Image: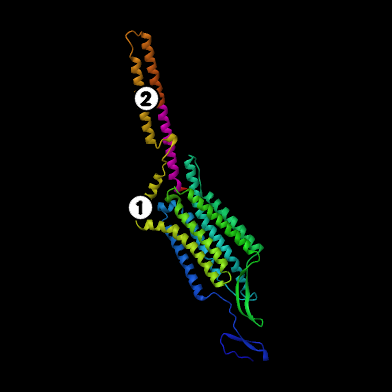
Amino acid sequence: MCICEVVDEYAVGIGPTATCIPAENMNFITPALKAFVYFLIALVLVVAVGCFGWIYWYRNNLLVQVAQPNCLGLIILGCIVSTTTIIPMGYETEYRDSPDIIGADVACMAVPWLWGLGFTICFSSLFAKVWRVKQLFKAAAQFRRVKVDNKSIVVVMGSMLLVESVILIAFQAVSPQIWEREVLDDIDGYAIESEGGCTSENGWWFWLALILFHVVSLFYAMVLCFQTKNIPSDFAESSHIFLAVMFLFQIMILAVPVSVMVMDDPVVLYFVRAFAVFLQNFSVLCIMFGPKMYRIHTGEDTNATVKASIQSTRPKNSVSGVSSSGDFKGSVRRFSIDSNKESSAKYKSSSIVSPTSDSSDMEKAKEDSSKASSKVSRITTTIKQETQRLENVLKHRREKILLIHNN
């Protein structure tokens, strides 16, 4: 019998062929790295729960109401689901004959499901917020009545979740990921170094589909943010959403190629993927809730600020180049005065007749003056009616804008 003196070695073989070989290095994730990653998970969860509590506490604040609390809650939920992706990322086992191999296989497919659904819930909420406000302001600009209720928002979010679910279901059914361990080095057939990971024969096609869908969605969201850049931020939050989407886009663009480059090192790959997921969710929470919390906790009268933003949405240009109803009234008054002056001058000029003029010329001049005055009166009446109509249109538009936070 062979007795190995080195602690990290064990005996193999019997008789003259017995020998000591190093214990297999399975390249498991170090406990210190896992502890650090779990700290990041806890940090996101604490911030998310704090944001939930903050929304509930300030639910009657006009700034929170305008920001659509339902969408804010879904953003938090999406970040929580996406962050839990990190937990199955760190699940490891030995070979296929291990007793916990089923758990390892489940963890392998839990990663794309949690990451995909979490991202879609969070992003679709961001997308629905800016899309909803764009529809309302677009209708107001065209003087149309439109109602964008929660059902419309659910349709938008449901469509994105449907596409994501179809890709994930196909992934699960066609070529699911399973746990495999590859031997890197051996001595006489005895493995001395190996590494494990999730593999799939055609899985990269589905990963590519998920990433492309996310990239296209992020790009379109940035276009919507650009289109709503002139809407006050108290309504659309377009600047905050644009910043959050840009962070998501940049992190994804950087994380994908870096993950491919370090794919041969499971420990480094785990850190890169886990840290990328943490950055995505933590940055979204900070960007979407940080400014709102700061404004309220610094004592700003957010109710008055939002109301002022509502008033600032009054259009600067209106029909026929008239800037506002007040300017329009001024134009009416100036037009009436000028017209009356012109009529008076015409009447005076027509009233000056020579002593030799007969009575028929005098009567004709009086008749022309009467017609001119009647014409001016009709024009003045028409302009006043148009002024009233314009004021009604502007009033209706302001009412539509004021109802944004109630829809």
Colour option used: rainbow
Residue 191 point in image, percent of width and height: 63, 80
Residue closer to the observer: 20 or 407:
20
**Measuring 49% from the left and 62% from the top, which residue is drawn there?**
281
**Which one is closest to the eye, mark 1 or mark 2?**
2
Residue that carries the numbered disc 2 in the rendered image: 339
Instruction: Name the residue at 56% across, 67% down.
Output: 261
What mark, if any, has residue 54 been given in the picture? none
The residue under label 2 is which amino acid type? Ser
The three-letter amino acid code for the residue at tag 1 is Asp
The answer to if 48 sits in the magenta stretch is no
x and y, in percent, of residue 270 in the image: 54, 70
Q: Closest to the observer: 249 or 28? A: 249
Q: Label 1, on which residue?
A: 301
The alpha-carbon separation of the residues under discs 1 and 2 comes to 50 Å
Above or below for 360 versus 395 = above
Q: Residue at x 55, y 63 (%)?
A: 115
Q: Is residue 81 visible?
A: no
Residue 310 visible, this orientation: yes
Who's the residue at 58% across and 73% down the image?
Answer: 92
Q: Residues within 10 Å of mark 1 (few under 14, many from 20)?
A: few
In magenta, the rendered stretch is 381-405
Judging from the image, what secondary structure is the residue with disc 1 in? loop
